[in-house]
Image (cartoon, rainbow, N blue to C red):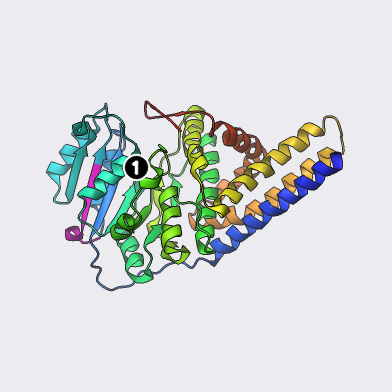
Amino acid sequence: MIDFFQYIFIVISLVYVGIIISFTIGWFGLKIYNPTTKKLSTKVSVIIATRNEEENIQYCLNDLIAQDFDKNLFEIIIVDDFSADKTILIIESIIKSTSVNIELYDLKSEKSENFSKKTAIQKAIEKSNGELIITTDADCRFNSKWISTLVDYYENSGKKMISGPVSYCFPRSFLGKFQTLEFLSLISSGAGAISIGKPIMCNGANFAYSKTAFYEIRGFEENMKYSSGDDVFLLQNFLKTFGSKSIGFLKNKNAIVYTKHQNSVKGFFNQRIRWTSKSSGYKNFFLILTAFSVLLFNLSIISSIIIALFYTHFLWLALILFAIKSIADFPLLFGITYFTKQTKLLFFFLPLQIFYPFYISFLGILGNLLNFNWKGRELKK
């Protein structure tokens, strides 16, 4: 029986390493996109679903107002999801002071509280005038060339959907640095997967797609029962309908969107549980294989440590698995931190590697069992 466990752990590790290597090859195979100098003509709708963002919305909108993209070609549509703070007042004040087309839609007018982020985005798209839909979040910050870089890539790549790079704002606390490094591993994995023609994930904070294509796949209709997943489910539906060549990752420093990390351990776990909660709706084989291989490989490390309490030679297996994971993970993390100019985060690589098996195993189980709280509202899985 013991030999059987060793064999299973080794097989799981080989699958995991194979997947991570493929993501790494994909990441380094992505070329930096250099925008053209031609005049851009695509009409754009930037959509922000917001709730209780009085601390962030002003900075987000100021960055959008300062974009170098033709102001006659883009609009900003904000859908407020029952904010209980000064978010709406701040937005209304900014609308009065700028010539940029900003529209505010208050979900309170719907006289219902059965809404999710997907509902908010869907309603914003219905009101939009742009052909290219760009979604982001109210706590995000942008380079002034963000929209023009996205649109240039859209017009010249022929992609129907674009995933862009996202990073946390440069963190100072240990928790912030841990979150940033872990988050960048997700972003680079998603980018690498798109690069090799196996798209599995993206991030709604920097996400763009054709409105025509969105309606062609009937939007979020198939996955409305899940509170989370406005980005990943849409990515998978685009993949199923239009194929992997319709999806691209924009690797350009001006296209990086910066967002805030969680300030508390509770907030961090609640956010990750929210992200994990949609996994029961996955249908794509490679996405399911990736999710299971990550979970099982990390469970293998923990199991080896537990078994080592009774069979000491299993401690060597645990150390070997840990070493395999570290060697496989490092190149990808180096690639993304070099791109975002955050290589100093790699000082936290080993602490992350030690903690990660316990964290991801705990999260993988609870994320499929518990409901989660989002900005004061409990949401169902």
Tell me where residue 34 sits by quadrant.
Answer: bottom left
Q: Position of residue 254 (x, y in %)?
A: 38, 59
Residue 60, quarter of the rendered image:
top left
Q: Is residue 268 left or right of residue 78?
A: right
User: Which residue occupies 50% across, 34% down?
Assistant: 273
> Residue 12's spot in the image, x, y percent?
71, 48
Give the crowd class for mark 1: few <14, some 14-19, many >=20 residues within 10 Å. Answer: many
Q: Which residue is mark 1?
A: 118
Question: Where 159 falls versus 202 (above or below)?
Answer: below
Circle 1 sits in a helix, a strand or a loop, which is it?
Answer: helix
The part of the chain drawn in magenta is: 69-78
Q: Nearer the viewer, residue 62 or 156?
A: 156
Query: Residue 73 lies in magenta, yes or no?
Result: yes
Which quadrant would the N terminus be assigned to in this image? top right
The reply to whether residue 138 is visible in this rendering is no
Q: Amino acid at mark 1?
A: Lys
Q: Residue at x 69, y 38 (%)?
A: 299
Q: Is residue 9 above or below residue 33?
A: above
The vertical placement of 244 against 227, above or below, is below
- Residue 1 is left or right of residue 298, and the answer is right
Q: Check residue 232 for magenta coloring.
A: no
Residue 304 seen from this side = yes
> Where in the figure is residue 345, as x and y percent of width and height?
56, 46
In the foreground, 73 or 62: 73
Total number of numbered discs in the rendering: 1
Residue 313 spot, x, y in % from top left: 87, 39
